[in-house]
Image: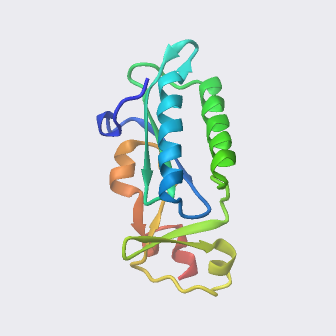
Amino acid sequence: MYIPFESLPDDAKIWVYQADRSLEENEVQRMTAAAKEFMDQWEAHGAPLSASFRISHNQFLIIGVDENANRVTGCSTDTKVRFVQLLQQKIGVNFFDRSLVAILDNDEVTLVPLQELKQRKVSVGEDTLTFNNLITTKGQLNSDWKQPAGKSWLSRYI
């Protein structure tokens, strides 16, 4: 069942999906409608999941579940992945391309190919903000999602 994202507790499980390009406003609207519909139907072994989502920076789809009511199972995780795959087909975007690194500059997200960072074709500073899409809780989303490149795994390329 869909709940407002702000209602998720800090220990809510989350997944961050990064689009391979910036989303247009009409795409965000279509994603919002589809995600609300999915959240209302999402369940684990017949029990509804208290779930929500957020689209951030027109670049990231963040899905969250309050597991204090019902826990996410392998089958419900598979259902979520199939939903994201269907969504990317409808919108024409790739949420599973891990070769792009998102950099935040003046509140604008720029995607940089990881290969270019490795070859130092793109310069990233110690204080350049990047995103840690491997976080797993809403609390981490609030505290650790955006981090200076110098304090992230990107530090080896600075």
Question: Which of the 4 image quarters holds residue 4?
Answer: top left
Relative to 115, is 64 on the left or the right? left
Task: Residue lying at the far front in this picture: please name it.
Answer: 26
Which image quadrant: the N terminus? top left
Question: Relative to 68, does residue 64 appear above or below in the rendering?
Answer: below
Relative to 25, is 7 on the left or the right? left
- Residue 25 versus residue 38: which sits nearer the camera? 25
Task: Residue lying at the far top in this picture: please name it.
Answer: 46
Count of picture labels:
0
Which residue corresponds to the image point at 45% horizontal and 19% vertical from the top-left? 70
Question: Relative to 99, does residue 95 appear above or below in the rendering?
Answer: above
Residue 147 position within the rendered picture, expressed as x and y whole percent measured from the top left = 40, 66
Relative to 139, is 17 on the left or the right? right
Which colour scheme appears in the figure?
A: rainbow
Which residue corresponds to the image point at 55% horizontal and 19% vertical from the top-left? 44
Residue 15 seen anywhere in this rendered image of the structure: no
Residue 85 seen anywhere in this rendered image of the structure: yes
Residue 146 position within the rendered picture, expressed as x and y whole percent measured from the top left = 40, 62
Question: Relative to 31, does residue 105 appear above or below in the rendering?
Answer: below
- Residue 138 versus residue 83: which sits nearer the camera? 83
Residue 145 position within the rendered picture, expressed as x and y whole percent measured from the top left = 42, 57
Residue 153 position within the rendered picture, expressed as x and y whole percent measured from the top left = 53, 67
Which residue corresponds to the image point at 65% horizontal and 24% vertical from the top-left? 75
Which residue corresponds to the image point at 38% horizontal and 57% vertical from the top-left? 144
